[in-house]
Amino acid sequence: MNIKRFDPVIYPQKLWVAISKDGKDMNGLFRHKKTDDIIRFEEYDFANFEAVVFPVSEVKSDYHGALIIFAKKKYMTCKTIAHEAVHAAGYMFKHIEQEIDSDEPFAFLTGWIADCCFKVKTK
């Protein structure tokens, strides 16, 4: 399993970026923020996805944030990273009940998330 946790420092959340074809190697590590259920990734259909984002809390630490899973490193293109970074930033803003009334904070967070994805891709 290739998973990395990042701390945005100015936001009270974490970001996890993983490369996993089906997420099963991460079973039991996260709770889904919408249901508070421990995520069993085999319940999700990853067959047609290059990447997917979940609003999560980590079971062992109870940190909240977003989990981005890329099926393969080759899917970590600029287009896909940008797309998933917007979803992750949206979940993170929703969690802190922050409206996207100014583009700058949202753009900053989205860029930071994209940079974290790029670090996972290149390391």
Image (tube, grey):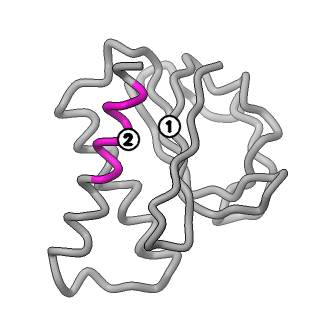
The picture quadrant where one finds residue 62 is bottom right
Please, what is the dominant secondary structure of the magenta stretch?
Answer: helix
Residue drawn where x is 39% and y is 15% of the image: 73
Left or right: 3 in relation to 84: right
Vertical arrangement, residue 77 with respect to residue 62, above or below: above
Q: Is residue 38 magenta?
A: no
Residue closer to the observer: 64 or 120: 120
Residue that appears at 26% across and 80% down: 100
Check disc 1 and report the residue beneath it. Answer: 17
Q: How many marks?
A: 2
Kindly state the secondary structure of the residue where label 1 is placed. Answer: strand
> How far from the left and from the top, in percent, is residue 8?
45, 61
Q: Are marks 1 and 2 in contact (CB under 8 Å)?
A: yes
Specify whether 15 is left or right of 59.
left
Q: 10 Å neighbourhood of mark 2: few (<14), some, or many (≥20)? A: many
Report the front residue among 21 and 109: 109
User: Along the line of sight, which residue is nearer the eye, 17 or 56?
Assistant: 17
What span is in magenta?
A: 112-120
User: Could you say where residue 95 lies in the image, as x and y percent from the top left?
Assistant: 52, 75
Marks 1 and 2, how far apart at CA: 8 Å
- For discs 1 and 2, the disc positioned in front in the rendered view: 2
At x 38%, y 41%, the residue is: 116
Q: Which residue type does callout 2 highlight? A: Cys
Q: Quadrant of the N terminus?
A: top right
To which residue does mark 2 refer? 116
In the drawing, does residue 77 fall left or right of residue 13? left
Q: Secondary structure at mark 2?
A: helix
Residue type at tag 1: Val
Q: Quadrant of residue 82?
A: top left
